[in-house]
Amino acid sequence: MEKIKYFIIGAVVITLVLSTTGSIGIYDKNVEISSMGPILEVTTDKTVYSLGETVMTILTNVGDEMMNAGGPTITIYNEDNEIVYHESIRCWHELEPGEYIEWPWDQTNQQGCQVPSGEYVVEGSLSQYVDEAIFYILSDELDQSQTNYDEQCPGPVGYFPFNTSWNVSIAQSFIPTKEILTRVMLYAGKNVTVSRPYVLAIRDNLTGENLALVNVGPGEFMVIPNLSWIEFDFSDIIINIGETYYIISYTSNITDNTYVWGANCSDIYPNGTAHVSMDGGNIWEDAPQADLCFMTYGRDNQPPTAPNINGQTSGKAGKEYEYTITGSDPDGDELYVTIDWGDNTSSGLLGPYDGSYNITKKHAWEEKGNYTIKARAKDPYVWGPEGTLKVTMPKNKPKSSPMPSFGLSIVFFRGNALVYRHIENNPSITLRPYDNKVKWFCLGKPWFSSSHGYVGIDKYRGIIKPEPIEGENISFLFVIAKEVIVMK
């Protein structure tokens, strides 16, 4: 059976999580069987979904014999053919021809957040039977539209010979109800001689600056009198709900380069009207008796979630501690993150991250005190709320003291025998302030055959710990400035 493939512009990588519940039903569609025996067909109940809408995967036996198989196994691939989710259920199914299994998914990822928009391939299998289907999740919704085309009312765009040659630009005003404008579709066609692209701009004034600009080549258009819906997909722009915006259409002013934007010669769209310019957009006139055929798509922006900050909440000044900062954007937007450590230092702007982040950073506070770590995330439009974690460094940072110029007396106990040796200052032996860092050095015989150890010095007290000798029980002490520490 040949599978129908669909194409949507602007699909992006996403991550899915399927629910672990299923149901069985009867497939009541007449299906052409391409071979004998059981045949698995994987479909979804729709091809295109809005954000948050349940995606139903359907695994159907479209063959003419019973399918005895285990599963299902569901695997989701992104457009780079990478596995982004895999789920396998151990159930045994006996599907008669026409029976099917439904598998719902609520569009949340493994962290329970809404996934971003994009293209998916869902591969379903029951034992050795495997098939796949393509579907799309769109991040936007239809907002404003006028779709009633009057064949007697085309709107020319470009070169238009009428008494004199006009360079025609036309526009349609609209009032959005969504915070973000994502794309526009126009009902349009072309003259067979067209050679230059159709240009669409979004403005908040007919002669103002372009808020968005995109062009579509002539190959996407049907030849008039046939028209079709053409998508103009641009980078999302944030707009003001309730204010008037304009869809501007124009093309190069050369002979026989003419497009048609379908219209209706009556005022049927309540939130705007058509506008016409005969000189390439310098002077505009209202056409209140007409509305052009258009659809705008948009969405309301949801800011990023407040970051979660996890890590040590109490410690010692001067010592590094590790912190993990996590969060996401409900719309799956690209994110940047900044971390303020509360001591007049910050991470700077980190990112970008694709819809979610899991950041690990280390930091040390140089002075004793109380601090608040603050983190925020920003999508392309706004900063999200702040996440905080209070930390306290009640212990002072250790201060380094230079070693005095006297010698070092060391006493070791080997079994019951006392062994003593006095070491004068030796430049080959490096003593350092105690900071939990290991400093290796060689003391040499006669105390042990493996003569490595490490030293930590806190002011004038310290510990030298040699590597243990197999079969020998060594305890030791040493004297610095007549102060003694004993270890056994």
Image: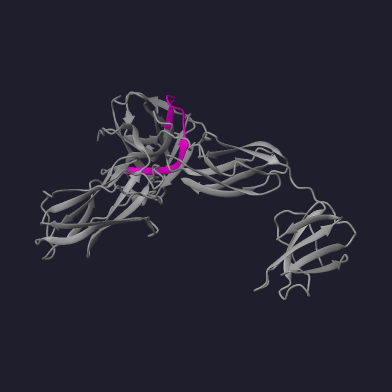
Image coordinates of residue 205 in percent, x first then y, are 48, 29
Taking depth in this image into account, of 122 and 451 the one nearest to the observer is 451
Camera sees residue 280? no
484 shown above or below 308:
below
Question: Which residue lies most toward the right here?
Answer: 405
Image coordinates of residue 360 in percent, x first then y, are 56, 50
Taking depth in this image into account, of 134 and 367 the one nearest to the observer is 367
Please identify the dominant SS of the magenta region.
strand
Image coordinates of residue 307 in percent, x first then y, are 52, 39
Q: Quadrant of the C terminus?
A: bottom right
Image coordinates of residue 110 in percent, x first then y, are 39, 48
Q: Residue at x 83, y 59 (%)?
A: 479
Asked whether residue 137 is drawn in magenta, I would say no
Question: Which coloring applies here?
Answer: one colour
Taking depth in this image into account, of 110 and 139 the one nearest to the observer is 110
Taking depth in this image into account, of 230 and 55 the one nearest to the observer is 55
Camera sees residue 112? yes
Please state the extent of the stretch shown in magenta in the rendering: 229-246
Question: Which residue lies most toward the front here?
Answer: 416
